[in-house]
Image: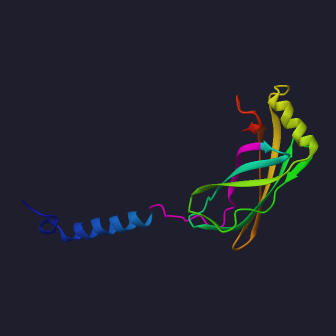
């Protein structure tokens, strides 16, 4: 059996040089840093005049996101809002990870009436807007989410 070296040492140099050049042209691994988190409304529960919101927070970065507080403002059908108290003290979200935070706050009479109309089947869905303020170690990050709220069948005062 013969080797490349015994035939042509210059061929070995050319092959090694080609491999080095091709590896330099390969894709570089880019780390994501500084992207704001994505938020969404997992569920909403109406309880004794309060709204209990389960908010999902997805860290889009390749680095851990340390959250010192989360506050939300919820708008239903472009109407009155419900404000939540700050929550989620000391939350740490893994790189590319997702956490669900539960926020609670009082709802206006109009929001409660609209939710009741969903529960009663008078309306099929209602547009919502959620503005979230996330305090992480480095900055305050406002972000928002939008969607349509539906009553959960067979579960009064629960919405998705």
**Picture quadrant where residue 42 is located:** top right
Q: How is the image coloured?
A: rainbow
Q: Residue at x 75, y 55 (%)?
A: 103
Position of residue 18 relative to residue 57, above or below, is: below
**Picture quadrant where residue 48 is located:** top right
Q: Residue furthest front?
A: 48
Q: Residue furthest top?
A: 122
Q: Residue furthest bottom?
A: 138
> In which quadrant is the C terminus drawn?
top right
Magenta part of the protein: which range? 26-45
Is residue 18 found left or right of 120 in the rendered image? Answer: left
Is residue 80 found left or right of 33 in the rendered image? Answer: right
Tell which of 124 and 138 is nearer to you: 124
**Residue 105 picture location, percent across and down:** 82, 53
**Residue 10 picture location, percent across and down:** 23, 70
Is residue 17 found left or right of 126 in the rendered image? Answer: left
Tell which of 105 and 34 is nearer to you: 105
**Residue 70 picture location, percent across and down:** 74, 62
Secondary structure mostly taken by the magenta-highlighted segment of the chain: loop
**Residue 114 picture location, percent across and down:** 88, 36
């Amino acid at each position: 059996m013969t080797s490349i070296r015994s035939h042509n040492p210059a061929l070995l140099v050319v092959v090694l040089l080609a491999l080095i050049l091709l590896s330099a042209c390969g894709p570089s691994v880019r780390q994501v840093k500084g992207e704001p988190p994505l938020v969404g409304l997992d569920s909403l529960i109406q309880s004794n005049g309060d709204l209990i919101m389960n908010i999902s927070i997805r860290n889009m970065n390749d680095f851990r996101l340390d959250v010192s507080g989360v506050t939300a403002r919820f708008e239903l059908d472009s109407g009155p809002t419900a404000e939540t108290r700050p929550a989620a003290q000391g939350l740490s979200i893994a790189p590319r990870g997702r956490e669900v935070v539960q926020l609670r706050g009082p709802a206006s009479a109009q929001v409660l009436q609209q939710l009741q109309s969903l529960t009663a089947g008078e309306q099929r869905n209602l547009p919502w807007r959620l503005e979230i303020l996330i305090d992480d170690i480095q900055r305050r990050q406002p972000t928002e989410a939008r969607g349509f709220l539906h009553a959960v069948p067979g579960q009064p005062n629960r919405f998705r």
